[in-house]
Amino acid sequence: MRVVCAVVLAFEAIVLGLAIPVAINTEGIDPALAGGVWGGMAAAVLVLSALQKYTWAHYAAWALQAGFLFTAFQVSGMLLIAVVFVSLWVTGVIVGRRTDALKAARDRESGAETVDA
């Protein structure tokens, strides 16, 4: 699960970085504000992408997903992109947990077969 989530976060950092010039040029948002908000979120997402092995980083990434959705209302067209990435995040968590459970079950089976042999 953590690998899928880290990949989604890495691609999300690109989108957040590209939101800065769009916010400045199309919405007239102050460059310092746009750079601070979306640039800060992009940097935080990259850091959390690298730290997905820690549980706290996974929960912090959930908070950043909420922040991404909240700030997407400020830039036209970004809400659709935010919904897509949050959907990818949720799907990655669900599918990743299922995959982790299957892997753990397979490891238990192989461990039981080794003990019986």
Image (cartoon, rainbow, N blue to C red):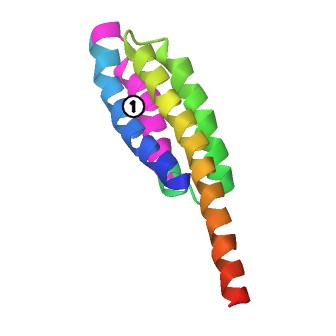
Decide: is 17 above or below 57: above
> Looking at the image, which is closer to me, 82 or 90?
90
Q: Is residue 9 visible?
A: yes
The residue pinned by badge 1 equals 16
Q: Residue at x 57, y 27 (%)?
A: 67
Give the left or right position of residue 79, taking residue 100 as reference.
Answer: left
- Indicate yes or no whether the magenta region holds residue 78: no
> Looking at the image, which is closer to me, 37 or 19?
19
Decide: is 40 above or below 97: above
Question: Residue 44: percent from the left, percent from the top?
Answer: 50, 43
The answer to which image quadrant residue 66 occupies is top right
Tell me the amino acid under the disc marked 1. Answer: Leu
Question: Residue 83: percent from the left, percent from the top?
Answer: 49, 21
Q: Residue at x 49, y 11 (%)?
A: 73
> Looking at the image, which is closer to me, 57 or 91?
91
Q: Is residue 43 visible?
A: no
Decide: is 19 above or below 40: above
Under circle 1, the secondary element is helix
Quarter of the picture containing the C terminus is bottom right
Q: Residue at x 47, y 17 (%)?
A: 72
Question: Residue 22: percent from the left, percent from the top?
Answer: 30, 18
Range of residues picked out in magenta = 26-47
Q: Residue at x 35, y 24 (%)?
A: 19
